[in-house]
Image (spheres, helix red, strand yellow):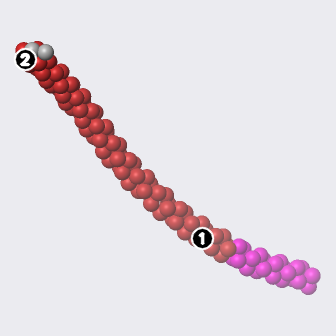
Amino acid sequence: MSPAEQETDSLGSLEERIQRAVQLVLRLREEKEAALNAAAAARDEVASTKNELASTKAEADDAQAEAAAAKAEVERLSDEVKSLQDERKQVRGRIERLLSQIDQLDAG
């Protein structure tokens, strides 16, 4: 091979390596851009999930507060029913005594 041919081969080889390097850089830039987009989407999804979690926790806290209030109301109403039943029992006893006294008056 003549020196001119060797130089041409060297230049051709160098040109080919440069083209491959350019293609590699372009592909890596595209991959980097895709990775950055995926990371941004993941960050957005994490932020959205955090917001949903906070909202769900707030709803759960509200539901627990409502349940506690309902339980207290049930206990209050149960106490009131018991009180009314006791009162009814006392009134029934009084009425029975009054009726008994009326029967005694009628018999007497």
10 Å crowding of disc 1: few (<14), some (14-19), many (20+): few
Q: Which mark is residue 3?
A: 2
**What is the x, y in percent for residue 88?**
72, 74
Q: CA distance from mark 2 to mark 1?
A: 105 Å
Q: Is residue 10 above or below residue 47?
A: above
For residue 106, say whether it is visible: yes
Q: Toward which corner of the image does residue 54 lie, by quadrant?
A: bottom left
Describe residue 41's horizontal placement relative to residue 70 as left or right.
left
Q: Where does the image place residue 64, in percent across and percent down from the top left?
A: 49, 62
Label 1 is placed on what type of residue?
Answer: Glu
Q: Which mark is residue 75?
A: 1
Magenta residue span: 85-108
Foreground disc of the pair 2, 1: 2
Could you tell me what secondary structure mostly forms the magenta stretch? helix
Residue 19's disc number: none
Q: Quadrant of residue 74?
A: bottom right
| Camera-side residue of 58 and 84 | 58
Residue drawn at point x = 33 percent, y = 42 percent? 42
- SS of the residue at dot 2? helix
